[in-house]
Structure formats: structure tokens, C-alpha cells
């Protein structure tokens, strides 16, 4: 198997566009690595590839579940590994693109989960809030607030009543991890504008059409771009306050994404040229070819 190309980075830096262009050049198919894009009807807030973009390259694991259905990292790992086997059996290259670090790590590395357990990423919670939840189970627990990976793993253990088993930091596939980045101020500015564009493109209408599903949907209650509307429904927040909260949560999430991808993968970082994105694509493509030729 040739190396799987893994494209990571915060929201708004061009992961979707890069994955499509590389797929065209490399005769590859794309596996979604975003935990929200898995769900139908969550289109604008998840910033999933559009239907037009999905016609440009074959995409997998997008729109496979309804918002009220449960879907865990265990399910994703199983489904995505089946897709890898299928794509590889047909002689195609594989690209994994997305921003949900735990999903991508669980797919590529030797993580064994207890079947049926739900592994939450707790993207809506700060480290301190996760630690508070852990202490509600056992107030003697001492975990450093900056160790988010351990905090998330521990809270999942308590909430599920089970544990990760045989977890080893062993990659199961040859991979080349591409990280897209830019000046932090530029990333944050793009995030703010992207949220405004989501509103202009109908995010409020999308969320209102899903209002009846909120009480039975975990993803709507936890996903950035959707959970922030709950106070709006209750009359406790204005639309302007919701927009500001989505922007704030998205910026905080981007910071956590950088930390995760820096620590969990051997990531090759590329500064995105937003004025000439083709230059960024060419640079990454040439680096991949050189790496595979060496």
C-alpha cells in the first residue's frame, strides 16, 4: 500500500480544496475525518464538502447517519477501516481529510475500543470543565489541566463505565500527514468571517429545520455551530450573541486542533498561500512525490 495522505488542520484553512485537488492528481478517494460531516442535514454548520465538491472526487463517510442516530469513534474506526480496505483493493490511493483528531488517530493507530462504547471528544468543553466533570465522579483524581488527552480519555471511561484496552501508539498504515496552517491571527479572522458567511448562507434556517431533533440528538447538543443555538431557542441569547459564541468556540477549537496534531502525528506543516492556493497545492504535491521516490 502506498502511504495514506492525511490532511489535517483547523477550520477554514483549505483542507477540503486540497484533498479534492490531490485526489484528482493522485487517482485517490477521500475518507471524511470530521465527526459532524457524518450526519445528514448538518451541512452549513459542519462546513462539509458541498454536493458539487463531492462530484469532483469520490468521498466516503459523509451523510451516512441521521442527527438522532448514535455514532461513536468505535463505529467510525470500523467503517473507515472497511473503506480503506475497499479503496486499496481497487488500486486507488487514499486520502483522509478532516479536523477531528481523535477519529483520525483511532482510524490509523492501534486503538481498540470496547464495542458499543461512546468516545466523546468533548469539543464543547474546556479542559477545566472536563476536569470538573471527572471530579464529580471521583474528587480525588489528580490530572494536570493541560493534559487534555488524558482528561478526555478519563471522562469517557467514567461516562461509559468501560475503558480503552490495548491502546498503543502504533500506526497500522504507511501515512504522510499534511498540516495546513497560517498566522494565528489570520486563521482566527478567517474563522470569524466563515461563521458570518454560514449565517448568510442559511445556517439559522438549517438549525431551525432541525429544532425538533435537538432533544434526541447528541451531535446537535455538542457540535460547534449547532449547540450554541440552544440558548437562542430558549430566549436566553440573541442571534448576534450566538454568532459571537460560535466564533469564540471555533477559535478555541482551532487552538486545540493545533495542539493535538502537533503532539499526536508526525505532521508536515505548510503555510497556506491564500492569495494563490494552487501554489500551496503544488508544493505539497511535489513534496509527497519526493518523499515517495526516496
Image (cartoon, rainbow, N blue to C red):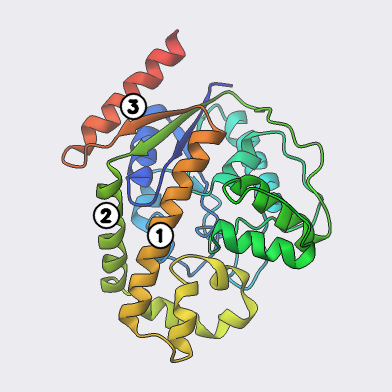
Question: Which residue lies under the disc numbered 1?
Answer: 250
Q: Residue at x 35, y 29 (%)?
A: 25
Question: Which residue lies under the disc numbered 2?
Answer: 190
Is residue 143 left or right of 204 when viewed as pictured? right
Q: Can you give x and y, in whole percent of width and height, for residue 121 in the image?
A: 60, 55
Mark 3 or mark 2: whose residue is earlier in sequence: 2
Instruction: For the residues labelled 2 and 1, say whether their Cβ atoms are less than 8 Å apart.
Output: no
Q: Secondary structure at mark 2?
A: helix
C-alpha distance separating marks 3 and 1: 26 Å
Of 64 and 210, which appears nearest the observer?
210
Say if residue 123 shows up in the picture: yes
C-alpha distance separating marks 3 and 2: 22 Å
Instruction: Tell me: residue 64, above or below residue 259.
Output: below
Is residue 131 left or right of 140 when viewed as pictured? left
Question: Which residue lies under the disc numbered 3?
Answer: 284
Quadrant of image for the N terminus:
top right
Amino acid at each position: 500500500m502506498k502511504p495514506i495522505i492525511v490532511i489535517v488542520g483547523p477550520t477554514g484553512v483549505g483542507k477540503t480544496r486540497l484533498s479534492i485537488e490531490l485526489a484528482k492528481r493522485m487517482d485517490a478517494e477521500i475518507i471524511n475525518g470530521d465527526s459532524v460531516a457524518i450526519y445528514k442535514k448538518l451541512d452549513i454548520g459542519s462546513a462539509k464538502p458541498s454536493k458539487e465538491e463531492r462530484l469532483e472526487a469520490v468521498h466516503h463517510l459523509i451523510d451516512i447517519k441521521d442527527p438522532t442516530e448514535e455514532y461513536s469513534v468505535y463505529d467510525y474506526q470500523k467503517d473507515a477501516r472497511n473503506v480503506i480496505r475497499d479503496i486499496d483493493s481497487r488500486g486507488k490511493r487514499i486520502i483522509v481529510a478532516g479536523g477531528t483528531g481523535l477519529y483520525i488517530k483511532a482510524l490509523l493507530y492501534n486503538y481498540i475500543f470496547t464495542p458499543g462504547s461512546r468516545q466523546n471528544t468533548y469539543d464543547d468543553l474546556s479542559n477545566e470543565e472536563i476536569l470538573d466533570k471527572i471530579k464529580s465522579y471521583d474528587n480525588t483524581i489528580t490530572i494536570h489541566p493541560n493534559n487534555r488527552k488524558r482528561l478526555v480519555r478519563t471522562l469517557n471511561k467514567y461516562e461509559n463505565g468501560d475503558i480503552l484496552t490495548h491502546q498503543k501508539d502504533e500506526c497500522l498504515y504507511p501515512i504522510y500527514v499534511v498540516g495546513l496552517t497560517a498566522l494565528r491571527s489570520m486563521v482566527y479572522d478567517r474563522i470569524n468571517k466563515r461563521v458570518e458567511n454560514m449565517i448568510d448562507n442559511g445556517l439559522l434556517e438549517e438549525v431551525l429545520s432541525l429544532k425538533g431533533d435537538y432533544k434526541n440528538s447528541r451531535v446537535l447538543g455538542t457540535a460547534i455551530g449547532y449547540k450554541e443555538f440552544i440558548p437562542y431557542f430558549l430566549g436566553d441569547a440573541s442571534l448576534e450573541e450566538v454568532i459571537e459564541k460560535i466564533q469564540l468556540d471555533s477559535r478555541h477549537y482551532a487552538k486545540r486542533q493545533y495542539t493535538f496534531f502537533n503532539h499526536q502525528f508526525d505532521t508536515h506543516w505548510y503555510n497556506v498561500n491564500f492569495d494563490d492556493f494552487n501554489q500551496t497545492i503544488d508544493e505539497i504535491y511535489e513534496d509527497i512525490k519526493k518523499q515517495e521516490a526516496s
